[in-house]
Image: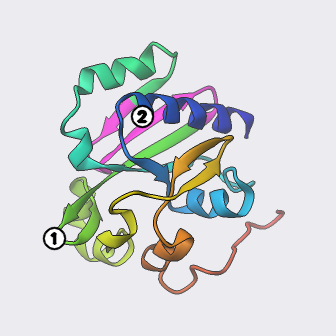
Amino acid sequence: MKDMVNLTRTAHAVLSIFNLTHMPFYGSLFGAYRYKNPLPWDQDVDLFLRREEMDKIDEDAFVNEFRKRGIRIIYRPWAGSYKIFMRKAEVDMFLFKDFSGTIRRTGLESYVFFVNHRNFHSFPSKYVEGILPQIEFCGVLMSAPHGGIDVQQYLYRDDWLIEKRPRGC
């Protein structure tokens, strides 16, 4: 957990250097609102990034900013995400794009499994437009979607209000 928190803080610092909108997402958004940290049983952190903003920066400079901090980074075109690693910690930075008022995850997977992605990886753009509220996550202030965890109803359709702890937690 300590490594995940430190890696998330470092990711936040790098993303801030490039003025990239980023926020905890998927299970990490639940963690931010419930614990101000990743969920205690989580194995990684998930962050939201905007594809439109990423397209405007120098990708080599972006990658090098992580590498000079001793962080491994890879781009996964299948998932439409960057994955960073340090020690046993991992952070997935998922790229989302606005398609006429609907935010959708990018990547080849979203085209091959388009029904799944439209049902579980898309939501109305109103949640991430304009000035975003702030939330504490891993000891730093990050952006959060408008409406708090309300966006989760689009990502976890039937059980978005239920906390599902794995066995033993």
Q: Residue furthest left?
A: 100
Mark 2, residue position:
15
At 58% across and 56% down in the image, what residue appears?
28
User: In this orientation, which residue lies closer to the viewer: 85 or 26?
Assistant: 26
- Amino acid type shown at disc 2: Leu
User: In this orientation, which residue lies closer to the viewer: 166 or 62?
Assistant: 62
Magenta residues, start to end:
74-89
User: In this orientation, which residue lies closer to the viewer: 46 or 147?
Assistant: 147
Residue 23 forms part of the magenta stretch: no
Report the colour scheme.
Answer: rainbow
Q: Quadrant of residue 17?
A: top left
Q: x, y percentage for residue 155?
A: 44, 73
In this rendering, is residue 137 above or below 65? below
At 22% across and 72% down in the image, what residue appears?
101
- Amino acid type shown at disc 1: Ser
Q: x, y percentage for residue 73?
A: 41, 28
Residue 82 forms part of the magenta stretch: yes
Instruction: For label 2, count other residues whose C-alpha is less than 10 Å away and answer few (under 14), some (14-19) or many (20+).
Output: some
Residue 100's label in the rendered image is 1
Q: x, y percentage for residue 1?
A: 73, 41
